[in-house]
Amino acid sequence: MPAAVLKMAENQAESAPGPEEKKRKLSGSGAEVQKAPAERSSFKLNSFSVEKILRESARDKTIFIHGKVGEDCGETQDAVVILEKTPFCEETLPQLLNKDADLRLQMKNDIYSTHHLYPLPAFNEIKTTVVYPATEKHIKKYLKQEMYLINETAGDYKTITSPYLQSQAFSVQWVYNILEKKAEVERIIYENPDPQDGFVLIPDFKWNQKQVDDLYLIAICQRRGVKSLRDLTAEHLSMLQNILQEGQVAISKRYNIPGSQLRIYLHYQPSYYHLHIHFTALSYDAPGSMVERAHLLSSVIENLQTNPEYYQKRTLTFALKADDPLLQKFKEAGKV
């Protein structure tokens, strides 16, 4: 998610390491990172007015809201606000279920009863992600839509997907800002600065960093010009192996989670076109980890060892939203 996607000011303290995290220092090249002052958000909740709900999920306890900012001064800008209930944290349960919490009975039948629990305000936290100012593309991204499955052959990539990507010139400047230490420096937990085989490991914005049950980190490659899985050849094996090995070691040292309890994968199609790898807790049903999008890094490495041009030749399957312009290109070519 781009650096411009910021948590609200009220939640900025989430990214700061707790006392135990401060004790756990990573070792190795570049692991000790200078921390820059946290950037303050320009978004103000008191100037936000709801336009419509784009999408909601009762299962994931999330809601995506499109709204306007600045109506009071007559010049408005679009914003997308994502609200998500945070997971329960074992350390805070004694305070959550204390005598000051308001427990109201709703129904009782024999030994079973249901209640509404109103905890102290400190435990009513809602993780809030803000896209501001938001473009029409951002709004459409979070809108609930029908999905279509695409089976992209090697030929389809050359004649449909690649020309489309080149024509769009998607900006990844926010990624370069991270790699060049111009943004989000305080969030980097590990770095290998090698320009060819190195990477930066950083928490994903989906994770509030308060518990490891839903751990989610992203490894962003230092090497420029590698857009996606389709670009990978045997030339990139040392980079991929570095990310797999060093990423697991860094996470084990900092969060005490072994590699055997991590799901490490790439997306195709990715949400942005600079190669990056996802590290999530195996117990966490992470968004985007479904079979039509996720490719395990260990399998990618093995495939490239077997055939250096594996991802230039094979058919790759992915899903596209109904309004995605790339889907229209596939329809025009008679592929959908």
Image (spheres, grey):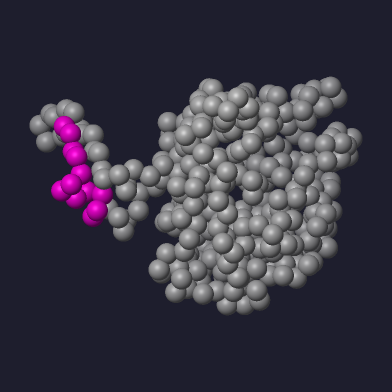
Which x, y percent locates residue 265?
Answer: 63, 53
Residue at x 35% of width, y 49% of height: 88
- 75 left or right of 284? right
- Name the outermost residue toward the front: 73
- The residue sitting at the left extreme is 110
- Residue 179 seen in the current view: yes
> Which quadrant of the rendered structure holds the C terminus?
top right
Residue 96 image offset from top left, x and y in percent: 26, 49
**In the rendered view, would you say 68 is above or below 84?**
above
Position of residue 101 relative to residue 198, above or below, is above
> Relative to the observer, which residue lies in front, 256 or 186?
186
Name the residue rendered at 80%, 57% in the picture.
224
Residue 74: give x, y in percent of width and height. Answer: 60, 24
Q: Residue at x 15, y 48 (%)?
A: 99
* 300 vs 22, nearest the viewer: 22
**Residue drawn at (69%, 63%), measured in percent from left and top?**
181
Residue 99 covered by magenta stretch: yes
Nearer to us in this view, 210 or 178: 178
Q: In the displayed structure, does residue 56 sit left or right of residue 297? A: left
Q: From this viewpoint, is residue 296 visible?
A: no
Number of labelled discs? Answer: 0
Q: In which quarter of the image is residue 242?
A: bottom right
Position of 110 with respect to 210 (left or right) is left
Magenta-highlighted residues: 94-105
Please state the horizontal and vertical placement of residue 31, each as a whole percent of the image. 61, 73
- Residue 43 among those drawn in magenta: no
